[in-house]
Each structure stands twice: as structure tokens, then as C-alpha cells.
Amino acid sequence: MIPDIEAIFLDVGNTLRIVIEDKDFMVDAKKQLVELTGAQMDPDSFYALLEERYKVLRKRAKETLIEASEREMWTKWMLPDFPEEKIGPFSGKLTRLWRDSDGRRVPRADVSMVVKELHRRGYVMGIIANTITETEIPDWLVSDGLTDYFKTVVLSSKVGIRKPNPEIYLEAARRIGVEPGKCVYVGDNPVRDVEGVLDAGFAMSIILIEPATLKKEPPKGDIKADRFIKTLSELLDIFPPR
């Protein structure tokens, strides 16, 4: 029995979009990181340095469930030995290049169709995502003509907290004016994307099976999503017109 759902929130990474390897794209991003910062290192060595510092930042984020802003990420964690007045203004661009260095992000083939159809069926749509970038997701929504289908976009880099902190889910529900008990969350992480949903009192959690995610974080025995799906299109079988 499906509860009375009014709002559907979606994750982005590995849910709405996936990363594909594009060697030239990735190499170019690393070169641009060096050029933009003026680092006196070759691109691979500079990337290796940044990667070690990034691991420290991610460990902190996962332990504290606090997300740094782009400016803090670069001036305090990634490049603390560079002048803040030089790095700070470029923090947004640096974040985009850093993400580009591990691949090109593209939407799943059925994303546009599913989002538009769920909206047509009368559901309020929103995004809740852990991300280090503040502009990439909004820019993607604009470029793909999807902005108007989402009533709110809640990004950890903007609100300063991360999933599975229940407050990020509750903030999203407040923004659209729907009680948590009538909200559902669709993600790909069978641990993080379920824990916070339960703690926030959302009606349902749905996990889109993504092999890469499951390999890194397999489901825990005592934490189970309400539904598992293999394609985003399966949401149309779960949620009829309101």
C-alpha cells in the first residue's frame, strides 16, 4: 500500500546523473586547475596533492555531516598555502574543474521524461543533494530545461549540512510546505539515503540500484529502503496521477 504522497524529492549524483570517463575532458580540467591557480607544478602532481587534501576534507564532512562552502573548501582545505584573496574569487570555478577532473556528468536517458511526467501527475518535485558545488546542479537544470519542474533545490554546499542529517530533509519539506509524512526520497545510497529519510519522518525511501554505489556502501541489515528500482522510469509505476 503506497502512502498518500504529495512530494517527491530526488538525489542527483548516480540518481539523476551519472559520471562517464572522458579522458580528454578530465586531462583538460587538471590543466585548467594549474592555470587558474598559478601552481608551479605539473597537472598530475598538483592533482595528486589536491586529492590527498580532499580526502581529509571528505572524512571531516562524513564524520560531522557539515559541508564546507566552495570558498571555505578552497581557501581553508584545498589550497590553504595560497593567498586567500587570490583563490577565494575563483572558488566556484575551481570546484567545477575539480569535479570535471573525475569525469563528465550526464543525465540518465529517462530523467527528463520521468521528471516532467511526475510533475504532470500532480506531485511537488524537489532536489536534496550532497554536493561540493553551489552552481553545477542549478546550471544543469537550466541547460536541460528542468528548472521549473522543481519547487526547491537543497544542496549541502549551500545549507552547510549533509545527508543523512535529517535536518536537510526537513528543510526541504519546509521550503515546499509539505509535511514530511507525505514526502518520499529517491536516492542511490542504501545507507545514507535511507537513514536520514527515516529520521526525518518521510513516508518512503526508494533506492535506485547503482552498482558502483552498492560496491562502496552495501545495505546494512537493519536499514532497508521501502523500494528498490533499477530504472528511474519505474517511479511511474509506483506513483499514479494524484
Image: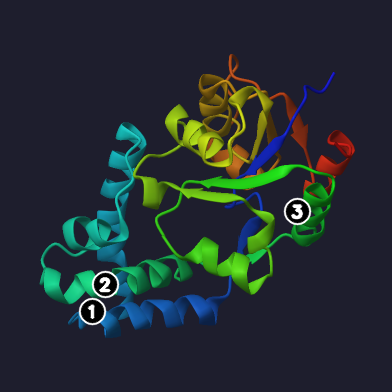
Name the residue: 49% across, 65% down: 136
Q: CA distance from mark 1 to mark 2?
A: 10 Å
Relative to 56, 236 lies left or right: right
Q: CA distance from mark 3 to mark 1?
A: 38 Å
Answer above or below: position of 114 versus 144: above
Image position, residue 56 (x, y; %): 26, 47
Q: Which residue is mark 3?
A: 115
Residue 77's disc is none
Residue type, numbered disc 1: Thr
Query: Tag 3: Cα neighbours inside 10 Å, few (<14), some, or many (≥20)?
Result: many
| Disc 1 + disc 2, Cβ < 8 Å | yes
Residue type, numbered disc 3: Val
Q: Which mark sits nearer the N-terminus, 3 or 2?
A: 2
Q: Which residue is mark 1?
A: 37
Question: Which of labels 3 and 1 is toward the front?
Answer: 3
Q: Which residue is mark 2?
A: 46
Residue type, numbered disc 2: Phe
Front residue (pair 186, 40)? 186
Rendered image quadrant of residue 187 = top right
